[in-house]
Amino acid sequence: MEKPTKETRGRKPTGEKALTNTEKSRRQRVKKTFSIKAAEESGYIPTMIMLNKQQLEALNEMEQGFGNQLTQDKLDAWVFIALREFLKDDMHKNLESVKRGLPENCHELSMIQTTAKLKFQQWEKNQK
């Protein structure tokens, strides 16, 4: 009688063997590097923010209501929208940087994410 195989999460190995921890770490570093470069080329500054667990749960619940999962890309978009709306408030619209005009939509942000993904995919192809 054969033992049932356990399904594992994540990317399936493209070769005959699974990725080592070193290879996984390298892929993550390269992916992050492409994201940072794409953001900087578009005039964005990659930063780290701290969110409360309940805030993340609420955003995840909201995304699930739309039939989606909360991803890093979607989280970036929600933070972008929240900051835009906060800065458009009457209390902040007299700030010089707000008067010069804020980005209105997340189109640029999604272009940054797409560029980074494409560069990473190209890098991945070159590794084979």
Image (cartoon, rainbow, N blue to C red):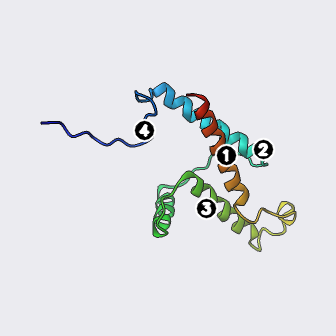
The x, y position of residue 91, in whole percent, is 76, 71
Q: Quickly name the residue at label 2.
A: 41
Q: Earlier in the sequence, mark 2 or mark 4?
A: 4
Q: Quadrant of residue 94?
A: bottom right
The x, y position of residue 13, in whole percent, is 43, 34
Structural distance between the alpha carbons of marks 2 and 4: 32 Å
Q: In front: mark 3 or mark 4?
A: 4
Q: Nearer the viewer, residue 50 or 31?
A: 31
Residue 24 horizontal side relative to residue 76, left or right: left
Q: Earlier in the sequence, mark 2 or mark 1?
A: 2
Q: Secondary structure at mark 3?
A: helix
Q: In front: mark 1 or mark 3?
A: 3
**Tags 1 and 4 in contact by the CB under 8 Å rule?**
no
Quadrant of image for the N terminus: top left
**Tags 3 and 2 in contact by the CB under 8 Å rule?**
no
Structural distance between the alpha carbons of marks 3 and 2: 21 Å
Task: Identify the residue at image location x=67%, y=55%.
Answer: 110
Q: Secondary structure at mark 2?
A: helix
Q: Earlier in the sequence, mark 1 or mark 3?
A: 1
The x, y position of residue 116, in whole percent, is 66, 44
**Tags 2 and 1 in contact by the CB under 8 Å rule?**
no
Q: Quickly name the residue at label 1.
A: 47
Task: Identify the residue at image location x=55%, y=35%.
Answer: 28
Q: In front: mark 2 or mark 1?
A: 2
Q: Quadrant of residue 104?
A: bottom right
Q: Quickly name the residue at label 3.
A: 78
Q: Secondary structure at mark 4?
A: loop
Which amino acid does the dot numbered 2 rest on? Glu
